[in-house]
Image (cartoon, rainbow, N blue to C red):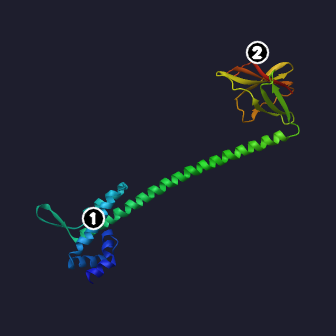
Amino acid sequence: MTKEEFLKTGLCEQYVLGLTSPEENELVESMLKTYPELKKDCMGLEDCMEKYARANAITPPPSLRKTVLQRVEESDAVPMKKGILIPTWGAIAAVASLVGLLFFSFFTWDGKTKAENEMGMLSTQFEQFKKDCSEVENERNVYASQKSFLQDSKTIHVHLFDKNKDALAIVFWNETKDNAFLKLEKLPAPPEGKTYQMWADIDNVMVDMGTFQHDLNQLIPLPYMANAASLNITLEKEGGSDHPDVSQLKVSGVI
């Protein structure tokens, strides 16, 4: 086999990567002895691969370093004077095999790391997607329940006005369902340190129905109060009061 025919086989590249069989190793080493100039091509390829691996180095697992050192210690070498070691072709083949192992490990380790990162990202996105779907489903159920309540023939609309009718709130009241919702239409946000509180007039006694957030875009659930004659909203100190401040009555409506 001529050296040109040998170069076309690709055995030189496979030899450097450690992918050749024992028989192919013998053929490569025989050709390198017959044509010493081929050593430059094979070793040049090895140097090129080593430079590329260094430029794109990724930290391999600790176990790989142990394997490399063990393989190097086990490789054969010919001793020279003053302790200098000249590697035999068997040692060169072992080192070349290790270069191939490192080269392959770098890409395998990098690919595994990227795959794990992508899997973690996809898992996080999937969990967020499930959370979003659950929230949308809950909102849909709330909307369907509120729509059914508002369309019920027993639901009445109680309009709460101030004296000048500048402020307006609507309470949807249903005595058969023992349920109620508040919708703020025209009611300014409470000043800092203050909150709105709802009261039911039952037998001329103002019964606390709780404080509520100022939200013009949502239906605000209210506790149902049987036998209530009217509903009233006052402005109270933050946290609410045990007794209404009638001087701060904002809107009121008869049921």
Describe residue 200's horizontal placement relative to residue 4 as left or right. Answer: right
> Which residue is label 2 attached to?
247
- At a point 75% along the width and 35% down the height, the residue shown is 219
User: Is 81 placed above or below 218 here?
Assistant: below
- At a point 27% along the width and 71% down the height, the residue shown is 42
Q: Which structural element holds mark 1?
A: helix
Query: Residue 183, image x and y in percent?
Result: 77, 33
Q: Earlier in the sequence, mark 2 or mark 1?
A: 1
Image quadrant where one finds the N terminus:
bottom left
Which of pointers 2 and 1 indicates the residue nearer the eye? 2
Q: Residue 26 occupies which quadrant of the picture?
A: bottom left
Report, in whole angstroms, how far the alpha carbon at label 2 lies from the one at label 1. Answer: 91 Å
Describe residue 27's horizontal placement relative to residue 125 as left or right. Answer: left
Query: Residue 24, image x and y in percent?
Result: 31, 77
The disc placed on residue 47 is 1
Amino acid at circle 1: Asp
- At a point 67% along the width and 44% down the height, the residue shown is 135
Image quadrant where one finds the C terminus:
top right
The disc placed on residue 236 is none
- At a point 13% along the width and 65% down the height, the residue shown is 80
Q: How many labels sit on residues?
A: 2
Amino acid at circle 2: Ser
